[in-house]
Image (cartoon, grey):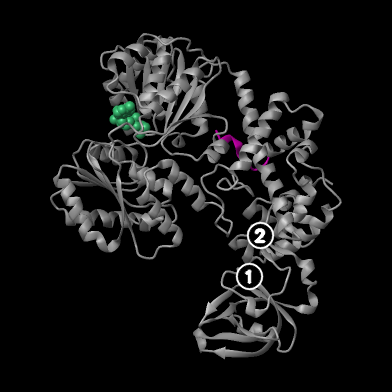
Amino acid sequence: MDLSNQDIKYLPGVGPKKADLFDKELGIRTAEDLLRHYPYKYVDRSRFYYLHEISEEMPFVQVKGQIIRFEKVGEGHNQRLTAIFTDGHETIELVWFKGVKWVLDKYKTGIQYVVFGKPSPFNGRFNIVHPEIELASQLPPPEQMGLQPFYNTSEKMKSNFLNSKTIQKIIFPLVQSIKTGIPDTLPAYLLKKFALMNLTESLVNVHFPKNADVLKKARQRLKFEELFYIQLNILQQTKWRDQHFKGFVFGHIGHYFNTFFNDYLPFELTGAQKRVLREIRIDVASGRQMNRLLQGDVGSGKTLVALMAMLMAIDNGFQACIMAPTEILANQHFASLKEFLGDLGVNVSLLTGSTRPKDRVILHEKLRSGKLNILIGTHALIEDTVKFSNLGLVVIDEQHRFGVEQRSKLWKKNNQLPHILVMTATPIPRTLAMTVYGDLSISVIDELPPGRKPIQTYHYYENKRQGLNQFIAKQVEAGRQIYIVYPLIQESEKIDLQNLETGFEYMCEVFPHYKINMVHGKLKTAEKEHQMQKFVSGETQILVATTVIEVGVNVPNASVMVIESAQRFGLSQLHQLRGRVGRGAEQSFCILLTNYKLGSNTRKRMEIMVRTNDGFEISEADLRLRGPGDLEGTQQSGLPFDLKIANLAQDGKMLEIARNAALEILNTDPQLEQNENKVMANQLRKMKTNTLNWGSIS
Ligand code: ADP
Ligand code: MG
């Protein structure tokens, strides 16, 4: 019996219609998929509680007893039904707001029921709203019920009678059928080494655990397996790449680098910049192709590091390029590189969508002949007509805007892969980086250049708007510029755009004498860049915008970032936005505006923002807040693939263990050809043909 070939359509209780829903809504097609659809929570039904034991913290209780009487309360729309239920000692109210007639038909007084639900405090007592009720005589004894699993479904599934309970009923016989044992997906020696439960037992117990202890063991094993295979896959690909692609050797540090370092560098490098440059230097001299991710908070000085890495390339007779996600950023890089390089004699050009055809021809020629040392540009760089003479290093700024496909086009410009340096200002927690960028080496600039004034952040409620306006006026009078950012998300785009426009009009009314402009994603690219440019050049004083300004824009004169409806932004995004200010010599401010009603999670986000400027601290907190604490089991966002059971915020330790285990195995058996490792090769092959989109990882 191969579970991965067994169509769920034929399982008892499924059929073509439900199978179709499983597929469309959850991507579940086979019996194996179904077994890997783990519960997102469990409820302890292994005992009955007495009513006097109930407390508010209990997510669910199970009580045995009978209904004494029913009472209808209220009229028409407000009608509800209550049942007075007793465990023989005390009473509790069961409450229904709908389905009154159905309830009265179905349940009778004086019969032993098992009632199950969430107790909520009401008028100084507890009641249970819309409880589950079952005949006591039809349930197995509680010792045999154990922990009851709860499964994710979708609204659509629920409205087609595929709720958690139905899924449980479908999975139950399937789990019974594997109890005799199925082949393990991990080799026996790994199970032994890490004292892991075998696959059969893990699957049985993850769905129907007898107690919390076995559940924990089962989950541990499944988490390990998940993380292990992610790492094995990434590391194997990395190894393969290292073997098949030789790297250019930048063997020596020469004239350009040394002259720049000694005579042109306007300031001391920070310790972190020096360390990262050493890391890059080792990579590019190693004979292996460099794939390095350079993380550094906004303003930490990544551009300079990139420039000095490019000088290493030039000293060794190679060309280099920087790819930026927008024209504005490309322009900025071009300007700052020109300024840094002065009359050093390095040839730098800019290529964007706006470059005139006539200039392009000249540029292409200089590029092909090797006269041009550094090319800076946007997507225009990956056009087929752009040919380098010998591209040795590619720097990619703010990588998340570039798809893998686009990058791979760039690789094809050479017979041999150039070294790659990817720069990002989005700090990524270590565990996440090991998963998402597991194939890249990572460098971190964890130190800002000296003399920066930390941005002051405040959280205001809407009613402070008057005061805020006065503050904005003061800043503008002092010659500063202001960002005002509105959220824009897909679902309610129309309303969002309205909010933005209203906000713009409001600012124009309040400040009739200031120059104010507006930027949002609906504008044509050229128009957007034109509007941005007006702010960059200082022509306008206030920019009302959506998050299109999030990436990399550098306006040192902007000192205030106002974020409207800040509750609607995630932590990392708030931090990115805040990083648009604090780039000049002046004290900068970030104002988070929210309405009054904030959930505890949102309140925490605001508190963290006010408390710290440290991007890494913020991203760790972000992962924690968005992570598994979320009991309803919504997916952790921000990952290019879904984790079914492991949790990067909590399982960092296990991730490292899994990664090391994978490394050790690949070191002795890179192709996974040894007998005991074949099971892993199979598993990897299966994963690649499955739903996971590994291509989007690197
Ligand atoms: P980011 O990492 O956000 O790309 P930049 O490279 O734009 O940061 O650097 C931000 C500013 O800091 C630039 O004006 C740059 O010239 C300056 N800078 C970079 N390194 C140093 C340093 N070691 N000392 C002082 N200023 C620096
Ligand atoms: Mg930058």
Residue 276 relative to residue 289: left or right: left
Residue 446 relative to residue 449: left or right: right
Asked if residue 634 lies in the magenta stretch, the reply is no
Magenta segment: 690-698
Please identify the dominant SS of the magenta region: loop
Residue 461 relative to residue 511: left or right: right
| Residue 112 in picture, x, y percent from top left | 75, 83
Q: Earlier in the sequence, mark 2 or mark 1?
A: 1
Q: For mark 1, does the 10 Å Cα neighbourhood hold few (<14), some (14 to 19), or many (20 or more) residues?
A: some
Q: Residue at x 37, y 39 (%)?
A: 551
Which disc is residue 60 wearing?
Answer: 1
Q: Is residue 314 above or below residue 538?
A: above
For mark 1, give the secondary structure.
Answer: loop
For mark 2, give the secondary structure.
Answer: loop
| Residue 529 in picture, x, y percent from top left | 30, 37
Residue 215 or residue 520, whichever sits in front: 215
Q: Is mark 1 within 8 Å of ligand 1?
A: no
Looking at the rendering, the quadrant in which ligand 1 lies is: top left
State the residue position of label 2.
Answer: 151
